Image (tube, grey):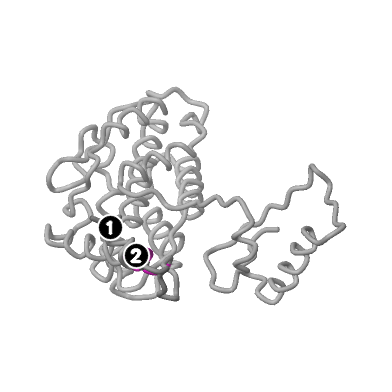
Amino acid sequence: LQNCHLARSYMPELERQIALFQAPGAAPNPTFRLWLTSMPSDFFPPAILQNSLKLTNENPTGLRANMTRCYGEVKGLDMFGETAESPKAHAYHKLLYGLCFFHSVIQERKKFGSLGWNTKYEFNYTDLEVGMQWLQMFLDEGAEIPWAALTYVVGQIVYGGRVTDPWDRRTLLSLLGNFLCPDLLIDGHSLSPDGAYTVPGCSTLEGYQSFIAQLPLHDSPAVFGMHANANITSQLEESTVLLQTVLSVQPRTVTSTAGGPSPEQLVAEKAV
């Protein structure tokens, strides 16, 4: 059962049906398995969560992890049936890298809170897939790269379709202009002011994956177009989320056994 977060009215019935599996006399088939998928929601039945094996699919953290995931989904670079040295294949390799880098940057800007985006947007891998399809189509149909058309479709439609704030849209197009430009076709072209991120001169998928594995583990705010002090906001937000999560899993009733430590004291001991 997919997308349970879209069926709020059915959740009580689903909880009742699953409870019947454990009723006296119930004998489900030993090979029976029920797979449920859902976005985070406050109405998903807690009883189902408590009696289930849970798998969480979260976005990677950091540019290197995001790029690794992007290229982990790429099936191959021989999209046009040409050699890797041909002009069209060479352009596709570079533009694909620039598109994946752009996708990773706008994903990671969310960690800066309101400094990154005025509104939080749920960019996902589907946007990148659609962008790849447009990229392939533009290169397949013309002898030259239509930079203006490519920028408009990717920036205004594919990713811009999610953006509602005009200043966020302006930021998005500015970032896209840095990562989808004629200079991207030059090996070694810098993608960040500090030169930590460059365009690789690879021609195979394995080569790009090896290059990505050597990217910096910790990202400089400069690559996102941010001041160095923006890291303070990012770290404060991460700390807030961590502490809120710790507080949310504590018992709601503050009681202790005779002479025993309270839940707050136990948490304090673990933290220290």
Q: Which residue, as the protein is rendered here, is positioned at the far right?
A: 25
Give the position of the C terminus as an image quadrant: bottom left
Where residue 219 appears, as percent x and y from the top left, is: 22, 47
* Magenta residues (range): 243-248
Closest to the observer, 249 or 220:
249
* Residue that appears at 78% across and 47% down: 32
Closest to the observer, 94 or 109:
109
Up-down: is 193 above or below 226? Answer: above
Where residue 105 appears, as percent x and y from the top left, is: 30, 53
Where residue 2 appears, as percent x and y from the top left, is: 66, 58
Up-down: is 163 above or below 68? Answer: below
* Badge 1 amino acid: Glu
Where residue 207 appears, as percent x and y from the top left, is: 36, 25
Whether residue 94 is visible here, answered yes or no, is yes
Closest to the observer, 123 or 191:
123
Name the residue that disc number 2 marks: 261
* Residue that appears at 26% across and 61% down: 174
Secondary structure type for disc 1: helix
* Residue that appears at 21% across and 40% down: 197
* Residue that appears at 28% across and 57% down: 269
Which quadrant holds residue 7?
bottom right
Q: Are marks 2 and 1 in contact (CB under 8 Å)?
A: yes
Secondary structure type for disc 2: loop
Name the residue that disc number 1 marks: 269
Residue 247 sits inside the magenta stretch:
yes
Label 2 CA crowd tier, 10 Å (few <14, some 14–19, many 20+): few
Whether residue 173 is visible here, answered yes or no, is no
Up-down: is 35 above or below 174? Answer: above
Left or right: residue 271 compared with residue 190: right
**Marks 2 and 1, how far apart at CA:** 10 Å
